[in-house]
Each structure stands twice: as C-alpha cells, then as structure tokens.
Image (tube, grey):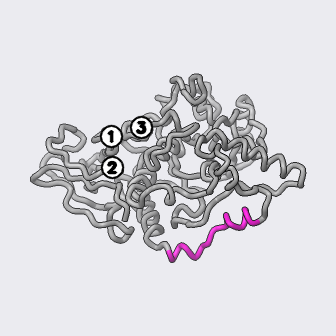
C-alpha cells in the first residue's frame, strides 16, 4: 500500500432498536418484540429532539435489510444514520472458517463479496435468499458506505454456538489479521465487539437471569434454536450446551482485561490500524473516493484516490501466496512517474506475523498469503 485515512469521533446518544423480525437470531433470547418499521421515523425524531443540539447517531439492526430506513425523510426514508450489515459478518465467517451452515448458506466468502460490500453495502438487495426461501433485502445501490456498520463479531453471533468461541479460535492468525485490516480500513463504519481488540481468549455465551419457570423455557428454547446448525443438532453437541441461567455461564463470559498486556501483539494490531484510519491524510478523508477489484478467489484490493495523486492501495489476501504476472488490473497501476511503497503490513512481526518481502518489483506483484498457521 503506498501512502493511506479521517474518522470523526463525536459524542453520540445511543439508540439501538431491533427493526422488524430477526430471522437469523436465536428465538430463545427470549424474543425481543420487533420494533415496527413505521415507528422508526418517530424514534429518530425523538432522539434528535431530545439531543437539544448535541450530535446523535442512530443505528438500526434490521435483518430484512430495508434500505429506506437510512434514507433521509425527504426521499421517503426514515432518517437513521446507519444499519448493521449482517452480510459482511456472514461472508467473513465463511471466508475465515469454511463453514456454511444455516444462515451462512447463501455466502461463498469470496473476494467478489468483499469488494461488492465496500461499493454497494448489502449483498442481498432483493435477490432470492435460499435459507429463507424468498427474496431478501431491498435496493441500496444509492447509499453511501457510511450508511453501513461492518463487523466480524457481535454478541449474538458468538453466542449462537455451543462453545461461545470467538473468531480467533475458529480461523488462522494470519487470515484473521488480514480480515481485521480490511474491516478497519475499508469504506464503511467498523464495529468491534468487547475484547476483540485484544484477542480475548474467553468464550462469550448467551446468558440470562430469569425466574426458574422462564429460565427453563429459555434453556429449552436455546437448545431448539441451535438445531438449525446441523453440527449442533447431534445429541453429542446438544449435551455440551451451557445453561443460560447458570451464573457460571455469565462468569465465564467476563473479560480478563489483563489480556491487553498478555496479548500485546493483537492489541497493537488494532491500535495501529485505527491510528492509520484516523491519521493518514487519504484514509482519514471520509467519505472517500475509491474503487475495488478482485485479484483471485481469496484476494482483492481497494484503491483510495487522492486529489494530488498520492493514492493508497489496500490489498487483502486470505489465501495462499499470490504471484501476479501478468497483472492485467488497472487499479494496480501506480500514478504516472511513481511506484508503490509498503506503508503497513499485517504480516509485521509486531503483530505476530512472519514478515513481508517486497511485494512489487521487477517480477511484478508477489502478495503474501494470509492462510499461515503461525
């Protein structure tokens, strides 16, 4: 990547609601009453009014992916600032773990999906969604990247398992570092789950403190909901499910903040990437001008354009080492009279990587892979 990014961090009043039915969530939580879509306008209006001049940022979690939620009222929208992009999480999980069960069925985890999400937000904007046996999403091609919150982990998705394992237990370190770099530098709004920034080693389970009668129903409903994953439907795995009402389930989910120091390389990775996004003059200039391209099934690039030609090239490879010769992709071409210089690499030994040889030279492009198991 030659040179690289400005996020603006302002005080915000949080307002998080579940907008419409959640079809890939556990129904045992117990069910949160869906927030009617038609009420979203009044919710946003109330938040803005109550803020009394303070900056507010309203984010929706809407599995059905109704794009009008984030369009301004003047264009028939509801005026939210952003929506969670579940497609990003699901595609990344397939790419990093290889598992395509249940609501991961409709994702391939290939480079095209990650380029498309940077450029267009949701992957599903009205196409047939095999898992739900119907169309999913609405057209969102007019929405800016800043309308989408992207993430690799959240409380629901980690807890939707028997083990409660975080992503670092399910993928290789090199692949996860590369995908983390994409998450934190790509167009869009990145979201981190608690402990992700230092590689928390403990699990995160679904836990709930209810009276005994309801607790029993929650425990049974939780087990039933996970049957959608064939690997969790066996008697062997069902016997491994923890009790959401057991206080030890909660205690095992509590963070060990001492891991910030013990996992210093993971903490440094996130710290340095956020600094790059915030301080680099090109990567920090949001909204940004960019384009993207697929280099291979597991490799892609995003090019951030600068007014003075000092572009930044973000290359992600979660597959094997890649030698591009020939390299018939125009976004790889340097600015006239210039070359490319590596400014940052996820394979730096500072992050537990194995080092980065020159990636651009006389024999064209040699892009190190992220599938290493160090």
Give the residue at mark 3.
113
Residue at the location (54% across, 45% down)?
149
Question: What segment is highlighted magenta in the picture?
Answer: 248-262
- Residue at mark 3 to residue at mark 2: CA–CA distance: 15 Å
| Nearest to N terminus: mark 1 or mark 3 | 3
Residue 53 appearing in the image: no
Residue 238 lies, in percent from the top left, at 68, 49
- Residue at mark 1 to residue at mark 2: CA–CA distance: 8 Å
Residues at circles 1 and 3 in contact by the CB criterion of under 8 Å: no
Circle 3 crowding by C-alpha within 10 Å: few under 14, some 14–19, many from 20 = many
Give the residue at mark 1.
297
Secondary element under disc 1, as helix, strand or loop, is: loop
Secondary element under disc 3, as helix, strand or loop, is: helix
Give the residue at mark 2.
319
Residue at the location (42% across, 57% down)?
277
Of tags 1 and 3, the one toward the viewer is: 1
- Determine the main secondary structure of the stretch shown in magenta: helix
């Amino acid at each position: 990547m030659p040179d690289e990014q400005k996020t603006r961090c302002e005080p915000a009043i949080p307002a998080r609601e579940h907008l419409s039915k959640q079809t890939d969530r556990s129904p045992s939580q117990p069910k949160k009453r869906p927030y009617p879509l038609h009420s979203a306008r009044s919710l946003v209006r109330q938040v803005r009014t109550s803020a009394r001049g303070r900056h507010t940022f309203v984010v929706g979690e809407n599995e059905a992916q109704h794009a009008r939620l984030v369009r301004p009222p003047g264009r028939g929208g509801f005026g939210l600032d952003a929506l969670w992009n579940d497609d990003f999480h699901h595609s990344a999980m397939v790419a990093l773990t290889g598992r395509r069960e249940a609501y991961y069925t409709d994702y391939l985890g290939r480079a095209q999906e990650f380029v498309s999400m940077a450029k267009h937000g949701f992957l599903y904007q009205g196409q047939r969604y095999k898992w739900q046996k119907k169309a999913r999403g609405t057209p969102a091609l007019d929405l800016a990247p800043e309308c989408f919150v992207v993430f690799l982990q959240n409380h629901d998705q980690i807890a939707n398992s028997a083990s409660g394992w975080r992503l670092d237990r399910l993928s290789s370190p090199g692949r996860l570092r590369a995908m983390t770099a994409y998450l934190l530098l790509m167009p869009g709004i990145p979201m981190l789950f608690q402990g992700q920034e230092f590689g928390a080693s403990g699990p995160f389970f679904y836990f709930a403190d209810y009276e005994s009668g309801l607790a029993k129903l929650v425990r049974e409903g939780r087990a039933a909901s996970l049957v959608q994953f064939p690997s969790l439907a066996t008697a062997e795995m069902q016997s491994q499910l923890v009790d959401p009402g057991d206080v030890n389930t909660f205690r095992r989910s509590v963070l060990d903040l001492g891991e910030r120091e013990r996992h210093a390389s993971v903490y440094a990775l996130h710290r340095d990437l956020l600094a790059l996004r915030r301080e680099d003059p090109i990567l920090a200039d949001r909204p940004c001008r960019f384009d993207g391209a697929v280099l291979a099934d597991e490799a892609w690039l995003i090019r951030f354009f600068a007014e003075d030609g000092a572009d930044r090239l973000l290359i992600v490879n979660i597959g094997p080492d890649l030698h591009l010769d020939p390299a018939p992709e125009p976004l790889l071409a340097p600015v006239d009279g210039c070359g490319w210089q590596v400014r940052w690499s996820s394979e730096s030994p500072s992050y537990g990587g194995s080092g980065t040889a020159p990636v651009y030279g006389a024999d064209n492009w040699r892009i190190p892979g992220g599938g290493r198991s160090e």
